[in-house]
Amino acid sequence: MKSDIRVCANWESAHDRPVYALGDRCPECEGPTENSAPAPFSPEDPYGEYRRRARRRASE
């Protein structure tokens, strides 16, 4: 699912808060924008256990 609402790709370094737009460019800094929708989630994810295990190993 793709959202029409986009967020400035470098808002953390260029702005105090997220800046949302409908176009390909940020209205305040003219930087690129990216999709603001979160990744899809499925409770029946067959590889979720392996991803969580790898993430725990990487943080240790």
Image (tube, rainbow, N blue to C red):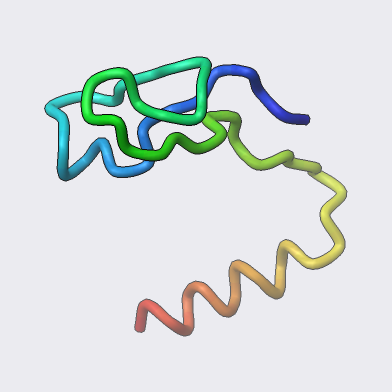
Q: Residue at x 82, y 54 (%)?
A: 45
Image check: 9 left or right of 57? Answer: left
Q: Quadrant of residue 38?
A: top right
The number of numbered discs placed on residues in the rendered structure image is 0
Q: Residue at x 66, y 23 (%)?
A: 3
Q: Residue at x 39, y 18 (%)?
A: 20
Decide: is 13 above or below 25: below
Which sits in the foreground, 57 or 37? Answer: 37
Q: Quadrant of residue 1?
A: top right
Image check: 23 left or right of 49? Answer: left
Q: Quadrant of the C terminus?
A: bottom left
Decide: is 3 above or below 9: above
Tell me where residue 4 appears, x and y as whole percent.
63, 18
Which sits in the foreground, 5 or 28? Answer: 28
Which sits in the foreground, 26 or 37? Answer: 26
Tell me where residue 40 appears, x and y as whole percent.
73, 39
Tell me where residue 59 appears, x and y as whole percent.
37, 77
